[in-house]
Amino acid sequence: AAWARPRGVIFDLDGTLVDSFADIAAALNGTRAHYGLPPLPLEAVRAQVGGGSEALVQELVPLPPEQRAEALRSYLARYEARVLRETRAFADVPAVLEHFRGLPLAVVTNKDEHLARKLLAGLGLLERFALVLGGDSLPRRKPDPLPVRHVLERFGLAPGELLLVGDGRHDVSAGRAAGVRTVAVATGPEPRAVLEAGGPDAVIDRLSE
């Protein structure tokens, strides 16, 4: 069936609009080194990125509970210092944002909001988005539908008028639970088959599709 043109679009950030995995992995491995742990390969870090910083550090810097808060602070400081060192927008991002010019656009990420804003600003993309929500912007984050519902409310749209584009199961789950149309893009760590199993309205191989 032909899709009606959306009246607003939500994009995920890491793996959807930007390839930020090298900087995330470097910050994470710096934190692991601080605790005497050997570095992890990029792929191992990429696979854990969707849930936000706290989940990433808890999963990949195995420490006793009393050290976890300190480890998270250590990671965030390292990551903030190099957030734009190797991170780039995917090549088709400017054309896609241009295609949707005139519509309200949002970024909904599980990355902390101030880091998401710093990254988008550094790449010259921040002003393209009417709204940026991070993992710490609201009481709950993706896969919970709360951030998507917040965008619907702010943009004054019905669920059928909003499109959500992301590279992971968290994105699809949040979008589906809020009743919006979802497109999974296979440019992040999750394989196409995993994305398809989550039941998005479409799976695409690159954003320009």
Image (cartoon, helix red, strand yellow):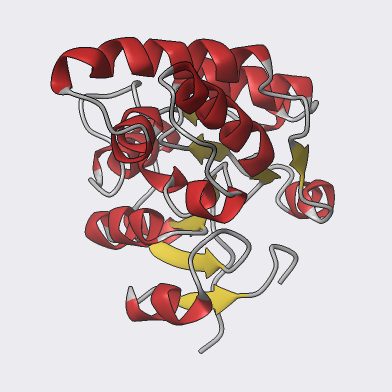
Q: Would you place residue 131 above or below residue 72 in this image?
A: below
Query: Which of the two residues, 16 or 160, is positioned nearer the viewer here?
Result: 16
Give the percent coordinates (x, y) of residue 112.
Answer: 44, 23
Identify the image quadrant of residue 23.
top right
Q: Residue at coordinates 36% horizontally, 29% vertically from top-left?
A: 135
Q: Residue at coordinates 66% horizontally, 74% vertically from top-left?
A: 205
Identify the image quadrant of residue 19.
top right
The answer to whether residue 131 is seen in the rendering is: no
Q: How many labels does the image show?
A: 0
Give the percent coordinates (x, y) of residue 59.
Answer: 31, 40
Query: Which of the two residues, 102 or 93, is positioned nearer the viewer here?
Result: 93
Position of the C terminus, as image quadrant, is: bottom right
Decide if residue 154 is on the left or right side of residue 41: left
Give the percent coordinates (x, y) of residue 87.
Answer: 74, 35
Q: Would you place residue 199 above or below residue 139 in this image?
A: below
The answer to whether residue 160 is seen in the rendering is: yes
Give the percent coordinates (x, y) of residue 49.
Answer: 46, 44
Q: Residue at coordinates 44% horizontally, 36% vertically from top-left?
A: 155
Query: Which of the two residues, 87 or 113, is positioned nearer the viewer here?
Result: 87
Query: Which of the two residues, 89 or 45, is positioned nearer the viewer here?
Result: 45
Q: Would you place residue 176 above or below residue 202 in this image?
A: above
Decide if residue 117 is on the left or right side of residue 160: right
Q: Which residue lies furthest to the bottom in this view?
A: 1
Decide if residue 149 is on the left or right side of residue 185: left
Q: Residue at coordinates 23% horizontally, 58% vertically from top-left?
A: 177
Q: Residue furthest left?
A: 65
